[in-house]
Image: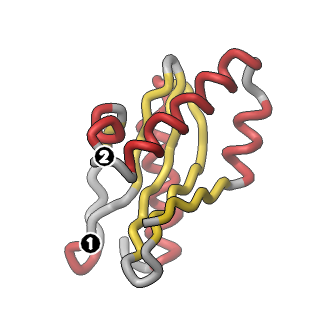
């Protein structure tokens, strides 16, 4: 299976506001958890959470996660595409841990309402 990164403009904007030290921590954590996605996912699940459960139509499950990265949090999605044998890792936002649940909910509502499944 192939891992494909999708990086949103909002994520890049958030990254640009960080110190060089925080940028390095974010990038190191992304590399660590993304590597785990192809190798059993244990480290990924140990470093992520779903702080809110979206009630999606047709019993669909949210692929949105909050990833711990020192004192920051990354809101990202992981979607498996078995037809093309790839895993998409979409990076949406970086936020402080205090605001992570609110940012997570905002992104989920935008994505899932736009898709018509919320």
Which residue is most to the left? 59
Q: Residues within 10 Å of mark 2 (few under 14, many from 20)?
A: few
Which residue is identified by label 1? 60
Q: Are marks 2 and 1 in contact (CB under 8 Å)?
A: no
- Mark 2 or 1 closer to N-term? 2
Query: Mark 2 sits on what residue?
Result: 41
The answer to whether residue 101 is above or below residue 5 is above
Q: Percent position (x, y) of residue 108? A: 45, 57
The relative height of residue 56 versus residue 49 in the rendered view (above or below) is below
Residue 79 horizontal/vertical position (percent): 42, 65
Q: Residues within 10 Å of mark 1 (few under 14, many from 20)?
A: few
Q: Position of residue 50 (x, y in %)?
A: 31, 44
Q: Which mark is residue 107?
A: none
Q: Nearer the viewer, residue 14 or 103?
A: 14
Quarter of the figure that contains the N terminus: bottom left
Point 57% across, 29% down: residue: 28
Q: Nearer the viewer, mark 2 or mark 1?
A: 2
At mark 2, the secondary structure is: loop
Q: In what quadrant of the picture does the C terminus appear?
A: bottom left
Asked whether residue 51 is in view, the answer is no
- Judged left or right of residue 43, residue 8 is right
Residue at (34, 48) in percent of width and height? 39
Nearest to the observer: residue 97 or residue 23: 23
Q: Position of residue 7 (x, y in %)?
A: 66, 54
Can the viewer see residue 64? yes
Q: How many marks?
A: 2
Task: Name the residue located 33 percent from the left edge and 61 percent from the top edge.
Answer: 62
């Amino acid at each position: 299976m192939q891992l494909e990164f999708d990086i949103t403009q909002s994520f890049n904007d958030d990254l640009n506001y960080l110190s060089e030290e925080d940028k390095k921590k974010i990038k190191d954590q992304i590399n660590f958890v993304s590597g785990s996605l192809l190798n059993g996912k244990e480290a990924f699940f140990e470093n992520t959470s779903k702080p809110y459960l979206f009630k999606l139509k047709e019993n669909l499950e949210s692929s949105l996660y909050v990833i711990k990265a020192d004192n920051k949090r990354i809101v990202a999605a992981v979607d498996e595409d078995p037809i093309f044998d790839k895993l998409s890792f979409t990076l949406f936002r970086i936020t402080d841990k205090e605001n992570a649940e609110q940012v997570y909910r905002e992104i989920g509502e935008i994505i899932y309402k736009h898709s018509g499944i919320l």
